[in-house]
Image (cartoon, rainbow, N blue to C red):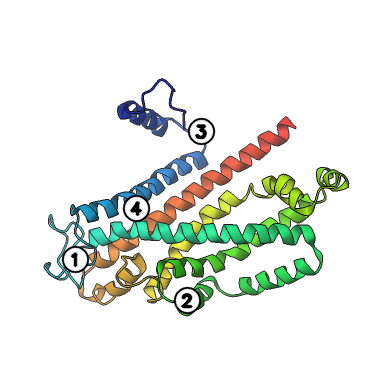
Amino acid sequence: MPRIPADVPHTDSVQRLAVVWRWCRRPLPTLSARLSRVGVVMVAVYGLLAVVMPLLIASGWLPDPNSGLENPTFAPPSLAHWCGTDRLGRDVCVRTMAGAGVALQVVLLAVAMALVVGVPLGMVSGYMGGPVDRLLVLLMDTLTTLPLLLLAVVMAFLLGRSLLNAALALCVVYIPQYFRMVRNQTAAAKAELYVTAARSLGAGPLWILRRYLLRNVITSVPVLITLNAADAVLVLGGLGFLGLGLPETVPEWGSDLQQALVAVPIGIWWTALYPGLAMFGLVLGLSFLGEGVDAWLSRSEIIGRAER
């Protein structure tokens, strides 16, 4: 994205929007770059909904996602209710848009916790080796053998239904992926000459891990973050569909889809269509974003090797 000139006043939002618009219209040479642009726009829309929806609901511009006693049940889409109402009279459009913020909160929190735990463990395991490495590898391999959804279901059942517990249940699922990727790269990088030279000069393991190895093993993490985030949206939806995700008072796409099952056979299609499309759009946007990040990192690595 082009840098906004320094002489543009901070209050001149029109010129800033013009810069963003020119960036969006700029032709891109590769398919990955085009997909990444689409992914950025899609994820930005969901992020904007996550920020704006609580404000609109709190100010009274939009109804509460849990209120619907004054509305007819299973009302079809109309001007009053753009996406119709569900079996409790709740506005499907408001609940679907409010669910975007809930999904992003849980997914980002889960991925951040998995990153904070998995990366240090992988670096320590790959650098230290020996019994510590074998113990951590055995633990992570045990977690990896379990299906992702099954492990998330067990953790959610043990922890209970809340936003933080749902994030913890997803976090446990993705820690082994960061661990294995970082461990393998650390084990390969610790044999490099610069690590050997630092060790011969008296540098300790913590200094070597933080100063030399972290920047080399962290390059592939952004791609894994986007892929895990896309997968976490589906796993969170599965937990909500099984009734193990978030509390009933929190608008969540998976639980809305589960409640819509009873209405689909009698022709009530809107209660399932819009939450499903919202979930699909977020997963697609994160996948496109990951494709663009992967292509950008690969190109940067090739240019770096050519310069060396």
Q: Quick check: can you spot residue 251?
A: yes
The local secondary structure at tag 1 comes to: loop
Residue 14 in picture, x, y percent from top left: 30, 28
* Residue depth check, mark 2 versus mark 1: number of the one nearer the observer: 2
Tell me which corner region of the image, top left, top right, bottom left or bottom right, holds residue 128.
Answer: bottom right
N-terminal of the pair, mark 3 or mark 4, is: 3
Q: Distance between the residues labelled 4 and 1?
A: 21 Å
Q: Which of marks 2 and 4 is nearer the N terminus?
A: 4
Q: What residue type is labelled 1?
A: Thr
Give the class, few, some or many, for how many residues have Cα within 10 Å of label 1's Cα (few <14, many ≥20). Answer: many
| Residue type, label 2 | Leu
Q: Mark 4 points at which residue?
A: 50
Q: Which mark is residue 85?
A: 1
SS for tag 4? Answer: helix
Q: Are marks 2 and 3 in contact (CB under 8 Å)?
A: no
Q: Which of marks 4 and 1 is nearer the N terminus?
A: 4
Front tag of 4 and 1:
4
Q: Which of marks 2 and 3 is nearer the N terminus?
A: 3
Quote the CA–CA distance across marks 1 and 3.
Answer: 44 Å
Secondary structure at numbered mark 3: loop
Relative horizontal placement of residue 247, taking residue 298 as reference (left or right): left
Residue at image point 59% right, 58% down: 116
Residue at point 44% right, 22% down? 6
Disc number at residue 159?
A: 2
Give me the residue at 31% from left, 72% from top: 248
The x, y position of residue 55, in whole percent, is: 27, 51
Q: Where is residue 217 in the image (x, y as percent from the top left)?
A: 68, 50
Which is nearer the N-term, disc 1 or disc 3? 3
Of callouts 2 and 1, the N-terminal one? 1
Q: Name the residue under label 3.
A: 29
Above or below, 219 relative to 126: above
In this view, 248 is above or below 306: below
